[in-house]
Amino acid sequence: MSNQKNPELNLQMGLRIRLLRTSLGITQADLAELIDVNTSFIASVELGKKGLSIKTLCRLAQALYTTTDYLLTGESPFQDPTSMEARLSVMEPPVLQGAEELVRSYLKVVDAFKTE
């Protein structure tokens, strides 16, 4: 799906990828490692110089906790695609379970401070 015929699509998708990546606090190198590509590829995608295959688009969406629809169109069922609600909605069940366990642990600590 390398979309050389629609450079505007590549540019807009690259901007959304950069927004999500930076909102997660990960580097281009981190993202590249997560989806098994090199860092220069991520840089080129974020600049709109390269399109994505379907396989890479799906890997990116999963790594960035978003949907392929959001990456392609900018449309999301959530007002803020970087919100916790949006990210939780696309997590795989084992990852979601881990996130829930972390939140429960955090809330126990918060509750312990409230009672002191």
Image (cartoon, rainbow, N blue to C red):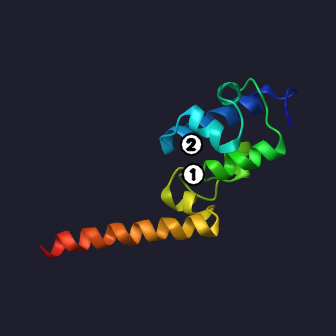
Instruction: Count the marks.
Output: 2
Q: Residue at x 67, y 33 (%)?
A: 14
Check if mark 1's residue and mark 2's residue have beta carbons within 8 Å: yes
Whether residue 30 sits left or right of residue 51 in the image: it is: left
Whether residue 7 sits left or right of residue 108 in the image: it is: right
Q: Residue at x 56, y 58 (%)?
A: 86
Q: Quadrant of residue 13?
A: top right
Residue 60, how many percent across, how many down?
69, 45
Residue 8, how many percent across, how many down?
75, 28
In the rendered image, which quarter contains the C terminus? Answer: bottom left
| Residue that extends furthest to the bottom in the rendered view of this protein | 115
Q: Residues within 10 Å of mark 1 (few under 14, many from 20)?
A: many
Q: Residues within 10 Å of mark 2 (few under 14, many from 20)?
A: some
Q: Amino acid at mark 1?
A: Pro
Q: Residue at x 45, y 70 (%)?
A: 101
Front residue of this view, candidates 96 and 85: 96
Q: Amino acid at mark 2?
A: Leu
Please name which of the two marks, 1 or 2, marks the residue nearer to the observer: 2
For disc 2, the marked residue is 20
The answer to whether residue 32 is above or below residue 75 is above
Q: Which mark is residue 13?
A: none
For disc 1, the marked residue is 81
